[in-house]
Amino acid sequence: MRMVSLTVNGAAVSREVEDCMLLVEFLREELGLTGTHVGCDTTQCGCCVVHLDGVSAKSCTVLVLQAEGAEVTTIEGLARDGELHPLQRAFREHHGLQCGFCTPGQIMAGAELIETYPGRLDEHAVREEMEGNLCRCTGYHNIVKAILAAAEEMKPGMVSEQR
């Protein structure tokens, strides 16, 4: 057992953990943040995507000890002051979900994508960049529409800083 300290959704947390504990297990079991889902355990599906120091990471393949000192944002931490993030709103408005299991990972990966390419996304780029996030229900069309709608809303100068 070793002590790990990190910031999760803006709050400092420290816990004693097993050396082999995955970040996804830490978030779900130790912190009760169950929005991050476990889909495949093999980094194939993207259901477990969180932001690790601002970059999308599949938390099923990151040991929590590797996140020592890092800042982690989960789907629960994306909204601010009771207001949904523009991408969360867009997923709801454009029906970018069906069963919802992949939705947290899709949103977290999509949010980083929008920040990485502000004002420069098109359908082809979204489909290519999101290929590591699988959905078994929607066929992706509405996921792409939601990401593009949020990207449009979040263009520099269009809305106030959301994060």
Image: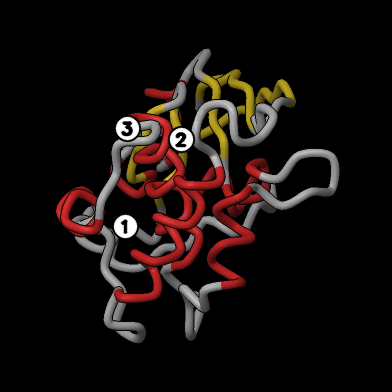
Residue depth check, mark 2 versus mark 3: number of the one nearer the observer: 3
**Mark positioned earlier in the residue sequence (3 or 1):** 1
Dot 3 falls on a residue whose secondary structure is loop
| Most distant residue in the right direction | 81
Residue lying furthest front: 157
x and y, in percent, of residue 32 in the image: 69, 53
| Residue 19 shows in the view | no
Q: At 35% from the left edge and 83% from the top edge, which residue is drawn?
A: 138
Helix, strand or loop at label 1? It is loop
User: Can you give x and y, in whole percent of width and height, for residue 62 in the image?
Assistant: 33, 36
Q: Nearer the viewer, residue 15 or 50?
A: 50
Question: What is the number of the mark on residue 117?
Answer: 3
Q: Label 3 amino acid? A: Tyr
Q: Residues within 10 Å of mark 1 (few under 14, many from 20)?
A: many
> Is label 1 in contact with label 2 (beta carbons under 8 Å)?
no
Indicate the secondary structure of the residue bearing disc 2: strand
Res 46 label: 1
Q: Would residue 122 appear left or right of 51 to someone viewing this image?
A: left
Rate crowding at label 2 as few (under 14), some (14 to 19) or many (20 or more) other CA atoms within 10 Å: many
Left or right side of 151 for 154: right
Q: Are marks 2 and 3 in contact (CB under 8 Å)?
A: no
Q: Residue at x 39, y 66 (%)?
A: 145
Checking the image for residue 131, the label placed there is none
Please report the residue visible at 44 percent of the width from the left and 29 percent of the height from the top: 52
Vertical position of residue 15 compared to residue 149: above or below: above
Point out the tag, 2 or 3, that comes first from the N-terminus: 2
Label 1 – label 2 distance at C-alpha: 12 Å
Question: In the rendering, which numbered label is found on residue 51?
Answer: 2
Q: Which amino acid type is shown beneath numbered disc 1?
A: Gly
Amino acid type, mark 2: His
* Labelled pair 3, 1 in contact (Cβ < 8 Å): no
Let me know if residue 60 appears in the view.
Answer: yes
